[in-house]
Image (cartoon, coloured by chain):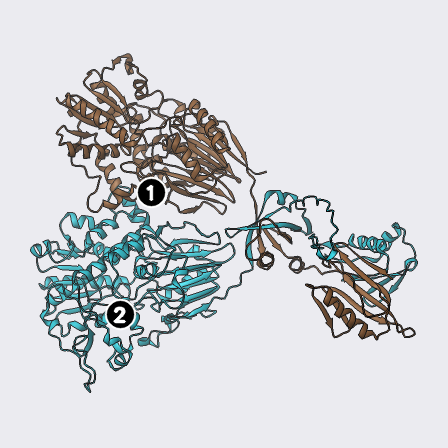
Chain colours: A cyan, B brown
Amino acid sequence: MKLYCLSGHPTLPCNVLKFKSTTIMLDCGLDTTSVLNFLPLPLVHSPRLSKLPSWVCKDGTINLEKELKECAGRVFVDSQPEFCLPERELLDLSTIDVILISNYHCMMALPYITEHTGFTGTVYATEPTLQIGRLLMEELVKFMERVPKAQSATCWKNKEIQRMLPGPLKDAVDVWTWKRSYSMQEVNSALSKVQLVGYSQKVELFGAVQVSPLSSGYSLGSSNWIIQSHHEKVAYVSGSSLLTTHPQPMDQSSLKNSDVLILTGLTQMPTANPDGMLGEFCSNLAMTIRAGGNVLVPCYSSGVIYDLLECLYQFIESANLGTTPFYFISPVANSSLEFSQIFAEWLCHNKQSKVYLPEPPFPHAELIQTNKLKHYPSIHGDFSSEFRQPCVVFTGHPSLRFGDVVHFMELWGKSGLNTIIFTEPDFSYLDALAPYQPLAMKCVYCPIDTRLNFHQVSKLLKEVQPLHVVCPEQYTQPPLTQSHRSDLMLELQPPPMPYRRCSVLNLPFRRRYERVYILPELANSLVPSEIKPGVSMATVSAVLHSKDNKHTLQSVPKPPPVPPSKKRKRVMEEPPVVLAPKPLLSGAVPLEAFLATLQKHGITEVKVEETADGHILHLQADDTLIQLEEDGTHIVCDNNEPLRTTLRDLVLRFLQKL
Amino acid sequence: MPEIKVTPLGAGQDVGRSCILVSIGGKNIMLDCGMHMGYNDDRRFPDFSYITQNGRLTEFLDCVIISHFHLDHCGALPFMSEMVGYDGPIYMTHPTKAICPILLEDFRKITVDKKGETNFFTSQMIKDCMKKVVPLNLHQTVQVDDELEIKAYYAGHVLGAAMVQIKVGSESVVYTGDYNMTPDRHLGAAWIDKCRPDILISESTYATTIRDSKRCRERDFLKKVHESIERGGKVLIPVFALGRAQELCILLETFWERMNLKAPIYFSTGLTEKANHYYKLFITWTNQKIRKTFVQRNMFEFKHIKAFDRSYADNPGPMVVFATPGMLHAGQSLQIFKKWAGNEKNMVIMPGYCVQGTIGHKILNGQRKLEMEGRSTLDVKLQVEYMSFSAHADAKGIMQLIRMAEPRNMLLVHGEAVKMEFLKGKIEQEFSIDCHMPANGETATVTTNPSVPVDISLNLLKREMALGGPLPDPKKPRTMHGTLIMKENSLKLVSSEQALKELGLNEHQLRFTCRVQLQDPHSDPDTLNRIYTHLKSVLKGYTIQHLPDGTVMVESIVIKVSSSAEDTSTKVLLLSWSYQVKHFYFYNVISSNTRAVKRLILIAINRQISIVNHD
């Protein structure tokens, strides 16, 4: 069993598991941090961005004035932003049988994998994962297509040139494999390969392996996966949460007793408490509004935003923000809000019981009804006429490189009254803000990452007790910036097996057994004998049938009578008759009883001689020796076949056959 | 032989009070727990005393599963769980769990408040009963206990309707509940995978009907409503608040819009808004088209359909009224019916099946004079139309489901005996499987013949697979041999060698030796060498080894040569083999270069080894 690791990003994993002749891809996360190296894509022409100076190498040898711009000491690529894809050279992607998706954040690379690689398999995901994943992809495509950029910068990727660039561009890896966004057509084609599954549904793959999604508590429809055969069990843990937010709680017990547990998607903010962050979010928001400023919240269109809105729903009145407009701007804002209300089965208990009333599970329905929350597909159109300040705007993309958020950065960045509050943990806020410097607006960083922290995961692992743990190498050492925090890493016995991008791990797995079915006819014909109390055995001779990776044992058919052949064939040509091989023997032959038996069969002249290990019986009439020992019997008999056969049968009477 | 037993307590050769007991692999499961709308006495509920005479059912049932929210499938649930007594799990889908208590409460109100019956379940009992409900998701495998697992499939029929697969070990039963094999305006079609259950328990409401295309029926319905409205008549459509009602509302709503009609459409009060809200929140259970477009336009927000008030019934002019309940046995639909029955311009359209004993059933059978409570009679002058909109599978659909699931046996419930008999014949003829149709209280028994799952050691399996090459040849079955070890509950099939080890047994070697004399002037090692060379050339394909300790091994047969000190040309060949020696032939072991040609034929065939010496 092997694990091919195609992504080095611990929360956006992409691994391929080869297990029992199946090739299973676990998630296909898209590393979007690469877009931080690019200039933002403004929706409205931005004089500031277009006037940025070109970057010129100190010695003047490199001049890529069209491709590289400088802003506040950092260099950015002026081009359509590109993403860092999962590794595509490590193994032939067309051999992948299935892709298991754990949550909508971990499927963003799907079109790159399923299209143009010869992939012919099936993708398994839950319904919310598919629907919301589709929305996030659609949003990404629209963000990019709305502001087409003719230029595609490639010269900077030249190895010689890249070497000369300042960091972080210099250190970016595999830049040649970076790709632009996919098209909506590719998204639709990729998603048409998705087969929906429900939690705890058992999906058979080729009869060899069974996969089953389990609730992971992180987002709507998010799942961990169990990949198992009758005797082996691999648990794949991706983004999981033990906090009570909106999704169904995490199913922990089903992860028990796995041979290997692949652990990914831990919190990216191990030191930030989500509840504390939420409090800070609210108080900063209120403070800014009271002071007459606007609040910008760069966020994804699904996920934590539901919790933020719910929190605000309770907070608005008490903070006296009843008249402040809240705007949610995204091409998929409406769909995301609507979809969140129809997945009752995938919600936590509290929300489920609301649906039984019947009431919408999320209170943002009421915020919309009372006009406190308004959603728009973009800043163009209705929004521009209805827009009132001061206000709170939720919009994407959290990288601040594309989407409507770019416009608000340009609009509000110059005033110290305004505040940008970062809640998404995927991007470093300093990097995100870099192309907007110098900036007057206040920045508040309260990342909310509900995924498991190291403390929770240690406790979880103690409970579910996997034999081996595989995890990204980042989890096996403390974060670089906090190297003294040994509590911010996984410490396990045996130590976890770390992986990085392009690793190929041999998983410590020994398969010993396989399931086989004995057909009733054969089962009835077996004769068990008891070896010791509670343990019996039976010898089985049967025909093995293997079909679709299912094995059955059938009774041996009686051979058809051999038609008498007229031609005499040479003995050599006759194939050996296949008959049951003789069983192994066990036990010992007791001397006295054996002698008595011999006597019964008319063999009386027996001379017994004692040896170190047993006895030698000399049958004097036939010049035959029988050597009886604890673990063996040796019959020395010359040219007397009948006697040998008799003796053999007598000996066998005392022995157990296996 | 293991058996599966199925006993209907209700719905056996009948429609109403569905309640079917299944015994499988030592587990007892109750499928549905419905009431009969044709009766007002004890026959209203299934006869639970069949299960036990002395009270509580908890210890006799492992679980109860409710297929959908119609009262003939869940109406007896609070009675069973709270009044007879059952504390185990009750499984149903989320929409059923949401809607079922509302209908039960409705039913209770009609029975207790309107008819004044006592000794009936209370609101509190409905609540307590619902606390025992465990929600079920589609396709989720729910482990009821270590052995019993259940899985729900989409059934169409009404919002949240499910078919269930019940599985213990390798034995399984599928219960369809009520289902629909053709998608309609708001629901999708039932679907199941090829799960090959031992028994498929199917409803057979429309066992003999093959309904014409849905479009035709819809056009017919619209035409009838339209004609009636045109001539100023009032149209009453008795429905159940959830289900058919929504489909017909969607139908009329679009028709009204297209034809620009002005006549009001009403929906009887109470459930309307709420019912539509359930549809909005459980939109994932509706058909694909509605699901796809719900963000832009929610099909369950009706523009033309307004809430009904009792006073509207006397308004002049045409109108269409949807009123509950659907079989005209009580409530608002019955009240309106009484008001409108006398006018031949009016029309009642029965869009679903009516249980025997209900007014709906009577008028559909052409009865024109009805005896009402208080000995009054009612003359029925209005037009009575029957439109089969009720979403059950027809004969074609039932056959289609059988083809999908490939059951080993068939069992029909929820239908009329005569019609079942007809369908049974058809099924047995087309699929060559047994078809049962037990009456209430009668038990159908099916013997199953499950294979025995065993863990085979991979070594043994791989050895066996390797022998046959990558592709097993069906014409040449290979026989494999192993030892089955039965310990506690585990069954392991291993090679004999491994079995010895695992059982802690010592191996007993049984060997045979025989001596053969031959004349050969060469030295002992030479003789042996010549034998070796010769065997090598003759016995191709066998493992022949010349070992340094002065022995030749042919497979596991050991050959040694010795000679006596006095007569060095008389050699003694020692042949030694073990009991397990593999069968093969020795042929012509000849030292051809020697003058004295002795032919030694050593034949080791199967169970006997014979040495023949020829001069």
Quadrant location of the C terminus of chain A?
bottom right
Residue labelled with disc 2: A34
Question: Percent position (x, y) of residue A303?
Answer: 26, 57
The residue at 26%/20% (across/down) is: B384
Residue labelled with disc 1: B94
Question: Percent position (x, y) of residue A435?
Answer: 17, 72
Residue nearest the observer in this picture, B456 or B255: B255
Q: Residue furthest left?
A: A385
What amino acid type should be assigned to the residue bearing mark 2? Ser
The residue at 19%/73% (across/down) is: A434
- Subunit under mark 1: B
Q: Secondary structure at mark 1?
A: helix
Left/right of residue B174 with respect to residue A316 in the rendered view: right
Mark 1, Cα crowd under 10 Å, few <14 / some 14-19 / many 20+, is: many
Residue nearest the observer in this picture, B595 or B178: B595
> In the displayed structure, would residue A585 be above or below residue B122?
below
